[in-house]
């Protein structure tokens, strides 16, 4: 899969951008605050996911314009496709999105079409950072493969919000504990399904990441990835999320009710789970060096790309947002060599010499592509 053309106008500071992309490497070069990351962000939005910078919709539109428009032409193994994405200040709730001329209801309907893997400097902290970031990572990865999974996550979050609100009301005597039954039953089924999906993805991530880490450490260290559930002691060979698993989840919720009421929030469930990285038997989050943690982040992202290819038979587009400058030459070479058969967009402040004249370099200034 590769992007052939990108047209952007009004997205943050980007104005009349028109790029005929190379099938291999595309370097977006420019000083800080010129629009490099905005360009990467616009591509990412068209993959069906939210901004990786947590930008609010109103902040996506240029202050001096009334709307933004993004058009991306791309090709996969079967055909050429076009994504049209626009948003107006007049109605921020109404995103106009088309795939090959057909209107879509939600951005998530784009899942499975333009597949991308984005890598930002913040991702280098994934193994050291909060469990929330690791849950977000695995949920994005799983959603790219199974579109319906995103809807389940949304439903679970809504139920969790309602349950937490009810817990606080119970704590102050405004509601009865029996009112938790309806929420707990729904949460148990959805949470069990999420656990199954996450565990299955973790097993694949463990295989691919383990191989990649073995290479980057020159066989000196062994990386293992585990899914840590706050509900289930063992998830191996379990898939009955509507039956036995849901019952077990429900029992755990009921047994923790008094603790939850005291805390004012739900203390167990998939919202408390974690992805554990272990190097030579030691938890990377607690004992990993900066170099080890960065290597774990690198292999996670490359593994994500490999798993996407295995599942979809399409190579994803790789978006490297100012990451290479954060890596030493060894890790730079490792990343680029492992994604050499994929289309890559790289943002940087300094010009990168492309080996063998493969690829293109685009210079950006004040949100516009300029000639040099």
Image (cartoon, rainbow, N blue to C red):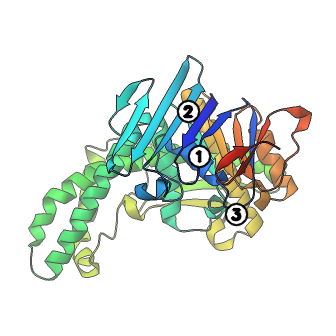
The residue under label 1 is 15
Q: Residues within 10 Å of mark 2 (few under 14, many from 20)?
A: many
Residue at coordinates 77% horizontally, 64% vertically from top-left? Answer: 291
Cα–Cα gap, marks 1 and 2:
15 Å
The circle on residue 221 is none
Q: Name the residue at the top extreme.
A: 78
Residue at coordinates 62% horizontally, 59% vertically from top-left? Answer: 123
Cα–Cα gap, marks 3 and 2:
34 Å
Residue at coordinates 27% horizontally, 49% vertically from top-left? Answer: 189
Q: Position of residue 324 (x, y in %)?
A: 77, 54
Cα–Cα gap, marks 3 and 1:
38 Å
The circle on residue 293 is 3
Mark 3 residue element: helix
Q: Residues within 10 Å of mark 1 (few under 14, many from 20)?
A: many
Q: Position of residue 2 (x, y in %)?
A: 64, 29
Q: Position of residue 44 (x, y in %)?
A: 55, 44
The residue under label 2 is 72
Nearer mark to the viewer, of 3 and 2: 2
């Amino acid at each position: 899969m590769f992007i052939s053309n990108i047209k952007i106008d009004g997205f943050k500071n980007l104005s009349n951008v028109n790029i005929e992309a190379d099938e291999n490497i595309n370097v977006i070069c420019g000083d800080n605050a010129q629009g490099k990351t905005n360009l990467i962000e616009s591509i990412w939005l068209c993959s069906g996911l939210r901004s990786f910078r947590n930008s609010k919709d109103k902040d996506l539109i240029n202050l001096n314009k009334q709307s933004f428009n993004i058009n991306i032409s791309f090709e996969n193994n079967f055909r050429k496709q076009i994504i049209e994405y626009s948003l107006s200040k007049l109605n921020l709730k109404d995103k106009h999105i088309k795939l090959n001329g057909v209107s879509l209801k939600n951005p998530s309907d784009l899942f499975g079409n333009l597949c991308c893997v984005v890598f930002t400097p913040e991702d280098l902290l994934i193994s050291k950072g909060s469990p929330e970031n690791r849950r977000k990572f695995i949920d994005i990865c799983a959603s790219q493969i199974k579109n319906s999974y995103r809807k389940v996550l949304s439903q679970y979050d809504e139920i969790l919000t309602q349950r937490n609100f009810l817990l606080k009301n119970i704590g102050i005597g405004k509601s009865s504990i029996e009112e938790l039954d309806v929420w707990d039953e729904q949460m148990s089924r959805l949470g069990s399904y999420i656990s199954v999906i996450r565990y299955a993805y973790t097993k694949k991530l463990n295989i691919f990441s383990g191989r990649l880490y073995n290479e980057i450490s020159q066989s000196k260290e062994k990386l293992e990835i585990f899914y840590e559930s706050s509900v289930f002691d063992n998830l191996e060979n379990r898939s009955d999320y509507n039956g036995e698993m849901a019952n077990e989840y429900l029992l755990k919720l009921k047994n923790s009710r008094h603790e939850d009421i005291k805390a004012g929030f739900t203390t167990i469930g998939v919202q408390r789970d974690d992805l554990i990285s272990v190097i030579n038997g030691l938890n990377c989050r607690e004992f990993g060096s900066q170099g080890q943690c960065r290597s774990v982040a690198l292999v996670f992202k490359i593994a994500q790309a490999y798993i996407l290819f295995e599942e979809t038979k399409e190579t994803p587009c790789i978006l490297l947002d100012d990451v290479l400058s954060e890596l030493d030459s060894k890790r730079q070479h490792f990343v680029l060599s492992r994604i050499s058969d994929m289309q890559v967009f790289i943002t940087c402040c300094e010009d990168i010499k492309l080996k063998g004249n493969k690829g293109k370099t685009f210079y950006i200034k004040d949100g516009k592509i300029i000639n040099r």
